[in-house]
Amino acid sequence: VASKTSPLKNHSKNVSKNHSGRTAPAASKGGKQKGLKLKTTPAGFEKFHEKSTNGAAPSSEKVSGKFRLPAKQLLQIYDAMIRARILEERLIRMYKQSDGYFWIGGPGEEAFNIPLGLNIKKGQGLDHDFMHFHYRSSGIILSMGADPMDMMRQMKNTATDPYSGGRNFGNHTSIKKWNILPITSTIETQYQTAIGTGIAHRQHGGEGITIVNGGDAGTAEGEFASCLIWASRPKAELPILMIVTNNEYGISTPAATQHGEKHIADRGTAFGIKNRVINGNDVEESWFAIREAMEYVRKERKPFLLEARVSRLYGHSSATGANLVTGEEDALITFEKKLVAEGVMTKKEIDSIREKYTAEFLEMAKKVKEEPMPDGSTIYDHVYKGQKGRYF
Amino acid sequence: MATVAQAIRMALHYGEKNLELKNVFGEDVGPPLGGAFTVTQGLETSWNSPLDERGIVGAAMGLGMAGVRSVAEIQFCDYIYNTIDLLKLAGMQSWASNGDWNLPMTIMTPVGAGIRGSIYHSHSFDAMMTHIPGWKIVMPSTPLDAYGLMLSCLKDENPTMYLMPKALLRFEGKEQIPGEPELTPEGKKQLRQMIDMPILGSEAQKTWKPKWPKLEEFTVEIGKGKITREGEHVTVVTYGRHVHIAGEVADRMAEEGISVEVIDMRTLWPYDWDMISTSIRKTKRVIFLNEDTEVTNFGEHLLRRAIDEFFYELEAKPKLIAGAFVPGVGLADPLEAASVPQALEIENAVRELVGEFA
């Protein structure tokens, strides 16, 4: 059995030596680059939320022009967005340089995913939110405070990958201490397991909720209907925030060729589930819609179906090339332009922060390449809780 | 003299009171019916789910991941097949997360033929289920084991599949469950009055509340089989209702001087290879017996392992007796009899093996 894994190990090592990675523009400056001094964890937001229950700017905060959120918060969101984008671009490069076998991720969903991640009640157990994510959720998880290097470790399938120990594809995150269930490749099964934590949340009470997300194509699976039905049982409604990020494609198949419904969110109406369609490429629209939906689910202990229209900037996955597509709105650029136009940031500051993260992540990727691969002898570990070695 | 159904019911009640069991659910599991086979009557935490097997398994998984202990029922294993990918996912949560997560949950489902259940109420599930890693799979053949195995499932930190041989759900045991009334006709009547719900729709049923006996802890360790007949000439390894059929064959053969050892595996995975291999080395002849369809049958795995490990010690070719590889079990008596192993077939196989000299 060991011989099955050793060629892979050797192959990866050779590849690592032959491809040192492209040098990003600001790589030589590395950590010396001074980006904006921004907090990227949700911690800063919690204080802000105490002042304003709906997320709108309190009167004491300065709001710029067309924005509803204060500048400080816009900057925090932007920082998390660009960080998530650059991470995904690094993961794609890792794949293309053979530092990973497959890439799938969520570049293009940052304007929705970062506001979502920053509003999650993070922690372990039923007093906190339970997350049933799909594989385009790196922005959410990163903005919750995950280490980008860990995501690279999973991409490189190293032994140090904390999410799966080198067993799973990148962006198949699993973090028990934050209630993030293992992300699966099986489409839509997360809507099935969400029922269970939803029941647990209902029985437990409090303000913890279940959050599940997935794409538009997956809603054709029976699991989506299951979740609608179980979440809306009379007198047994479940506090589940059902999210559909609609990029209008299922791999290569346009949704318009397979779906007759006008909006996916409309399906909630038949079950008495509150629902809404939003422009997920708009940061503030996403922010306020997420806040409102979450507030409803947390307080009313009932489901909400939120459909966010988003872009898919690098195609479905490496299976479709993982190249930048044309003709789709890039929410990051849209946001940058607005930030500059409203005087919240300068172009120079934007360039600076981009360079800073590009250099930082390149250095991380280089380090990850040197980390060990898992040993083939570990394949039986963890089949059961605490299991080490062959068990039969 | 509890039946297997009563034993499981009492185990679930014990779980509610002592083992943090918070949810027992599935189709018709809660009031008023209390399960298609009465297994969940009178429980405090039982409730009815939508008619959605995938939702049931998914809900059990989510509850388990949230640390909430539950038992979910699929009404017949014939209807569990559309949940296969979820069962695979459940079995891999610990492994896929490299040990970060674990998933305590129990699914129970009636399996097998024997009640003239026709095409879609007679399937077995052991061949399919034993092909899914990460689960522990049990299958009792007596009320006491049914009680003890359920308690073990409720204490386990991993997904557990509790297969109920439906033909045995009314089977009365000869071993007392700790706390149940005396094993006498009077005790049997008393238990029925205490925990069996009156006829559905009757006046008595509308106000009925169970009176549970003072049950005590009793577990059957997962992974441990049981020798139900000791013998010298041939070993029959089986589980579920065929434990009893093989036992009857063993009793008949004993009259002819043929000594048959019968092993009730009780746990299909992880199984008690120590017990099986010790017996094979003693008798040097082995038959693996179950009623699931014969192609890629779980018994074939056991057969392969027996050949791998004991080929040169065996004195006769090892044998598998299993169900016919046909899409379903036909309803008419002759069809069912031709589809799943019958006593005569087992008897003939035993004769064949003991008559063979390597």
Image: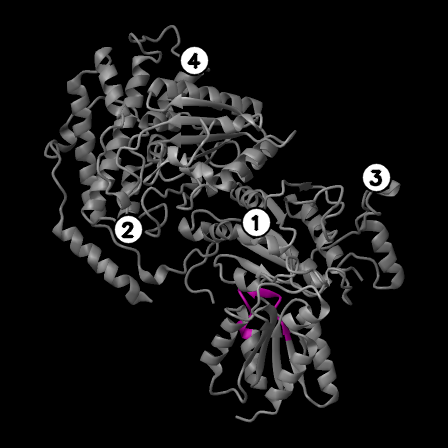
Q: Residue at x 88, y 63 (%)?
A: B185
Where's the N terminus of chain A, which quadrant?
Answer: bottom left
Q: Which mark is residue A51?
A: 4
Q: Residue furthest right?
A: B186
Residue A245 placement: quadrant: top left
State the residue in front, B285 or A304: A304
Mark 1: secondary structure: strand
For badge 3, the amino acid type reads Lys
Q: Residue furthest top?
A: A59
For badge 2, the amino acid type reads Thr
Is A159 placed left or right of B215 in the picture? left
Q: Specify the segment rendered in magenta.
A: B263-274
Mark 3 vs mark 2: give the one in front: 3
For badge 4, the amino acid type reads Lys
The x, y position of residue B126, in whole percent, is 57, 63
Question: Circles 2 and 1: CB distance less than 8 Å?
Answer: no
Mark 3 vs mark 1: give the one in front: 3
> Does residue B226 appear anywhere in the picture?
no
The x, y position of residue B200, in whole percent, is 81, 45
The x, y position of residue B19, in whole percent, is 64, 48
Q: Residue at x 47, y 36 (%)?
A: A124
- Chain letter of the residue beneath label 2 in the structure image: A
B233 shown above or below A106: below
Label 3: which residue?
Answer: B206
Q: How far, Cα to Cα, is label 4 from label 1?
A: 42 Å
Dot 1 alpha-carbon crowd within 10 angstroms: few under 14, some 14 to 19, many 20 or more: many
Label 1: which residue?
Answer: B105
Label 2: which residue?
Answer: A158
Q: How far, Cα to Cα, is label 3 from label 1?
A: 31 Å
Mark 4 vs mark 1: give the one in front: 1
Labels 2 and 1 within one chain: no
